[in-house]
Amino acid sequence: MNRFLKRHMKLAIIVLIVFLLAAQIPVVKELLARGATTLYVAVKYPDQTITFEHFEYEPHFGDYTVSYSTSKGDGTGLTLTPKMLPIFVKYDPWDQPMSD
C-alpha cells in the first residue's frame, strides 16, 4: 500500500470510530433512528403522507420503536435494531401479507 492509501485508511478508521462513539449519545441515537425510518418510509411508501409521533426504547425487547401516523388517522410503529446503532428496520407492520 502506498502512503496515500495508508493515510486515507487511517482517516476513515478515525472517522468511523468517532461516528460510533457519537452514536452512543441518546440525542444522536434518536436522530439516527428518525433519519433511518424517515428514509425507509419515503422509499417504501412514497404515496402516503406520514408524520413522526414518538421515539422510545423498549427494554423488554432491546429494540427502539418509532411511531408514525398517516393522514388517514391510522398509526404504526417501526421497530429498529441494534441497540448500539438503531438504523435497521426489524419490523414494519404495514409490510405484512394481507389476511382474509
Image (cartoon, rainbow, N blue to C red):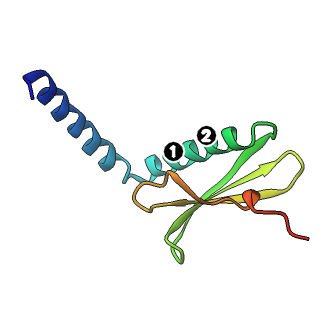
Specify the label residue 64 is tagged with. none
Mark 2: give few (<14), some (14-19) or many (20+) Cα within 10 Å. few
Closer to the N terminus: mark 1 or mark 2?
A: 1
Compared with residue 94, is residue 62 higher up or lower down, i.e. above or below?
A: below
Q: According to the image, label 2 marks what residue?
A: 39
Task: Judge by depth and name the residue closer to the eye, 11 or 70.
Answer: 11
Could you say whether the residue bearing mark 2 is in a helix, strand or loop?
helix
Residue shown at 24% from the left, 34% from the top = 12
Q: How many marks?
A: 2
Could you say whether the residue bearing mark 1 is in a helix, strand or loop?
helix
Residue shown at 85% from the left, 56% from the top = 74
Q: According to the image, label 1 marks what residue?
A: 31
Task: Kindly indicate whether the residue at mark 2 contacts the one at mark 1 (C-beta within 8 angstroms).
Answer: no
In the image, residue 60 lies at what x, y percent? 53, 78
Decide if residue 65 is on the left or right side of residue 25. right
Decide if residue 78 is on the left or right side of residue 98. left
